[in-house]
Image (cartoon, grey):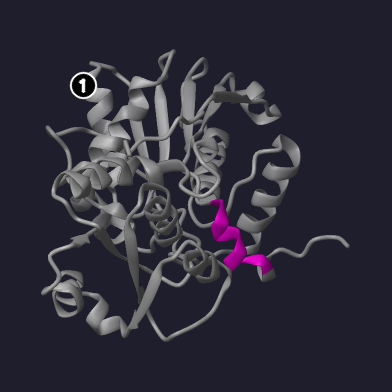
């Protein structure tokens, strides 16, 4: 079975009074539409890792994530689709939730580990699967050279050019891939990374290690809203308003923070009038399931 997806990732314009006032054209690349579960950058990061596993004769994907990890779910679904076994090593105490239910439904075996042990993922892989030649290590979030290669292909798909491209950052792999794609096409596009972690300056080192050559890009570290998986009322309200006004489903863990940053920077005149801006919807909308209690919706 060939490891590939026939996917649809169009670019839609976002119409908003703020952008009209500032003279901006803002668009969003709908990577959330790639696949219902293996969506967004999850597929892009997994694609070449799965091809590598197949080429090496590996049959068992072993990866890592938190209890609400979209990466775990995407890996479980990809394993089921392409004929692999899968195991997810989950950070923290054993729990049951909607995401892990879906992982199990796709056939993924789950192992829970304490947070201290979780920090050394290669050691965990060796502990549980070091004697099993069919095991294939996939780092948390698909962080890898192969993952960056898959993400770079996003630029190949663009029919038009943009002055700015925005993307949320978790592992830095998607950002690195997009920057590599921008450089390989010789574009003058300015890339903007929006880390979702508190004290997110560290992500520069993670991005840079996957770059094919040095690059200048902007890092916006003040839109973490308390840290990974954390939020504030203003971000929740922004997310609700965006979904209700555009019909595009987003979550406040990744894409919501990135779009909040874009809107805020636009309001602060960060961009020249006439600029064309592309936001990357990196999928992961299943993350909403872990934040349902944050949304106070009308009955």
Nearest to the observer: residue 186 or residue 219: 186
| Residue found at x 19% / y 72% | 125
Place of residue 59 in the rendered image (x, y in percent of width and height, measured from the top left): 24, 57
Residue at image mark 1: 184
Quadrant of image for the C terminus = bottom right
Residue 222 at least partly seen: no
In the image, residue 45 sits, relative to residue 186, either above or below, namely below
Q: Is residue 121 above or below residue 253?
A: below
In this orientation, which residue lies closer to the viewer: 2 or 230? 2
Which image quadrant is residue 113 in? bottom left
- On-image quarter of the N terminus: top left
Which residue is rendered at x = 68% and y = 42% of the image? 242
Judging from the image, what secondary structure is the residue with disc 1 in? helix
Q: Main secondary structure of the magenta part?
A: helix
- Taking the image as shown, residue 179 lies to the left or right of residue 13, namely left
The quarter of the displayed image where residue 55 is located:
top left
Q: Residue at x 29, y 53 (%)?
A: 142
* Range of magenta residues: 285-292
At which x and y percent is residue 230?
51, 67
Residue 274's spot in the image, x, y percent? Answer: 51, 15
Residue 291 belongs to magenta span = yes
* Above-or-below relation of 179 to 285: above
Image check: 58 left or right of 15?
left
Instruction: Give the image location of residue 237, x and y in percent.
Output: 69, 54
Q: Residue at x 17, y 38 (%)?
A: 211
């Amino acid at each position: 079975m060939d490891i590939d997806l026939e996917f649809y990732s169009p670019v839609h314009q976002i119409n908003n009074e703020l952008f009209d006032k500032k003279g901006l054209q803002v668009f969003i690349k709908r990577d959330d539409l790639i696949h219902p579960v293996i969506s967004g950058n999850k597929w892009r990061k997994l694609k070449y890792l799965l091809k590598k596993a197949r080429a090496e004769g590996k049959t068992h994907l072993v990866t890592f994530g938190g209890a609400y990890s979209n990466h775990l779910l995407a890996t479980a679904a990809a394993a089921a689709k392409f004929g692999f076994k899968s195991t997810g090593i989950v950070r923290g105490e054993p729990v049951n939730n909607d995401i892990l239910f879906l992982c199990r439904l796709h056939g993924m075996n789950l192992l829970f580990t304490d947070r201290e042990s979780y920090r050394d993922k290669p050691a965990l892989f060796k502990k549980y699967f070091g004697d099993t030649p069919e095991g294939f290590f996939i780092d948390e979030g698909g962080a890898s050279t192969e993952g960056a290669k898959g993400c770079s292909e996003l630029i190949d798909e663009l029919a038009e050019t943009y002055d700015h491209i925005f993307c949320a950052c978790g592992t830095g792999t998607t950002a690195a891939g997009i920057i590599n794609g921008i450089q390989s096409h010789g574009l003058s596009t300015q890339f903007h990374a929006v880390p979702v972690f508190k004290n997110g300056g560290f992500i520069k080192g993670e991005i840079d290690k996957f770059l094919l050559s040095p690059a200048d890009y902007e890092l916006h570290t003040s839109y973490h809203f308390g840290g990974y998986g954390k939020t504030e009322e203003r971000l929740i309200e922004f997310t609700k308003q965006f979904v209700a006004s555009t019909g595009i489903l987003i979550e406040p863990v990744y894409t919501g923070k990135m779009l909040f940053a874009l809107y805020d920077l636009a309001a602060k005149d960060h961009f020249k009038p006439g600029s064309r801006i592309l936001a990357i919807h990196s999928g992961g909308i299943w993350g909403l399931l872990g934040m349902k209690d944050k949304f106070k919706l009308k009955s």
